[in-house]
Image: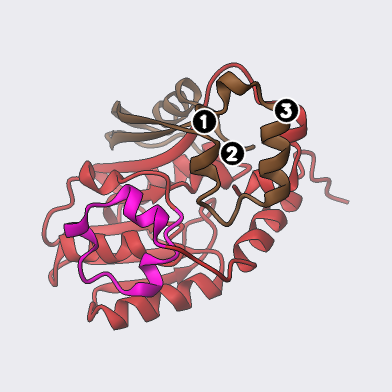
């Protein structure tokens, strides 16, 4: 999640890449217990998160967003 | 001498190492994201190693006969489900930069009796497919792993046919940043 964008930036990048009708269709908060389901979150990272992230944010560390867009024009050169 | 100003190679190496080291799995993620009906008949290998963050396939509008690109297929669960949706007249390109993931996806496709999945080794920043060659791009928890997200999304647009759709599930964060100790933890780039 260190590389995650804000939803606004994600949508903006999609639009700049040539997508239109970009919609955020679903948002699901991801808390520390959700993170713990994934083997990619090491015990050390989870412990760091529990220690440093304010308690009232531990149930919403990130948001899983489902985003859809339609390709309607030539993309900008990457 | 070239300089990697954004530590892109280092980030890629961290992600590669984290995904290569996955040995154990559980059904917990799959059972959280997908319905029992959706999971029925999905090979155990794919089921027990689901690493996605949402069920974007419910919104992906895959039609029979569509050509679908699964960006970062991992152990293959979404490729399997997309292959079922597009049916025998369509096909799914399962892309991943790790050969181990492609082997597992191919094994899961074999086990599931699906012959419309083609695995492709490659980077999402340089998708090895021609322009305007797919109808749908799907991706689950993968775009956030790239240090060059604008490039990834431009590549998705390039390979999509006009009118084609991208439907992704991905992690987003709120404006208030996470603590620097979390953001700079190596595992946080893969998790």
Q: At x 64% / y 67%, what residue is drawn?
A: B21
Determine whether the residue tagged by mark 1 lies in a helix, strand or loop. strand
Q: How is the image coloured?
A: by chain
Query: Is the residue at mark 3 from the same chain as the one at mark 2?
Result: yes
| Mark identifier at residue A52 | 3
- Confirm or deny contact between disc 3 and disc 1 (CB under 8 A): no
Q: Which residues are magenta?
A: B27-51
Question: Which chain's colour is brown?
Answer: A
Q: Is residue B187 left or right of residue B85?
A: right
Q: Quadrant of the N terminus of chain A?
A: top right
Q: Which residue matches tag 1? A: A62
Q: Is residue A21 magenta?
A: no
Question: Is the residue A66 above or below the residue B130 in the image?
Answer: above
In the rendered view, tell whether residue A30 sits above or below residue B34.
Answer: above
Q: Residue B120 placed where, x, y %?
A: 44, 70
Which residue is pictured at 31% across the width and 42% down the height? B167
State whether discs 1 and 2 lie on one chain: yes
Q: Colour of chain B?
A: red
Chain under label 3?
A
Residue sitting farthest toward the right? B1
Is the C-beta separation of discs 1 and 2 under 8 Å? yes
Please rate how many residues cluster around mark 3, counting C-alpha atoms within 10 Å: few if below 14, some from 14 to 19, many from 20: some
């Amino acid at each position: 999640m260190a590389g995650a964008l804000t939803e606004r930036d994600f949508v903006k990048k999609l639009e700049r890449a040539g997508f239109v009708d970009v919609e955020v269709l679903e948002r699901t908060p991801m808390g520390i217990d959700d993170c713990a389901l994934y083997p990619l979150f090491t015990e050390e990272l989870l412990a760091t998160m529990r220690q440093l992230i304010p308690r009232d944010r531990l149930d919403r560390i990130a948001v899983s967003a489902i985003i859809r867009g339609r390709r309607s024009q030539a993309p900008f050169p990457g | 001498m070239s300089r990697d100003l954004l530590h892109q190679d280092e980030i890629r190496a961290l992600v590669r190492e984290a995904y290569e080291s996955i040995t154990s799995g559980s059904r917990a993620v799959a059972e959280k994201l997908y319905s029992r009906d959706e999971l029925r008949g999905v090979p155990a290998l794919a089921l027990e190693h689901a690493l996605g963050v949402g069920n974007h396939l419910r919104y992906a509008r895959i039609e029979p006969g569509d050509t679908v690109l699964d960006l970062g297929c991992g152990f293959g669960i979404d490729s399997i489900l997309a292959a079922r949706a597009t049916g025998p007249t369509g096909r799914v390109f399962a892309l991943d930069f790790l050969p181990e993931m492609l082997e597992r996806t191919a094994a899961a496709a074999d086990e599931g009796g699906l012959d419309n999945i083609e695995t492709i080794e490659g980077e999402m920043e340089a998708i090895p497919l021609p322009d305007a060659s797919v109808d749908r791009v799907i991706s689950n928890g993968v775009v956030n792993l790239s240090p060059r997200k604008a490039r990834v999304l431009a590549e998705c647009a390039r390979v999509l046919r006009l009118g084609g759709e991208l439907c992704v599930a991905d992690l987003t964060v709120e404006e208030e940043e996470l603590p620097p100790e979390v953001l700079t933890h190596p595992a946080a780039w893969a998790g």
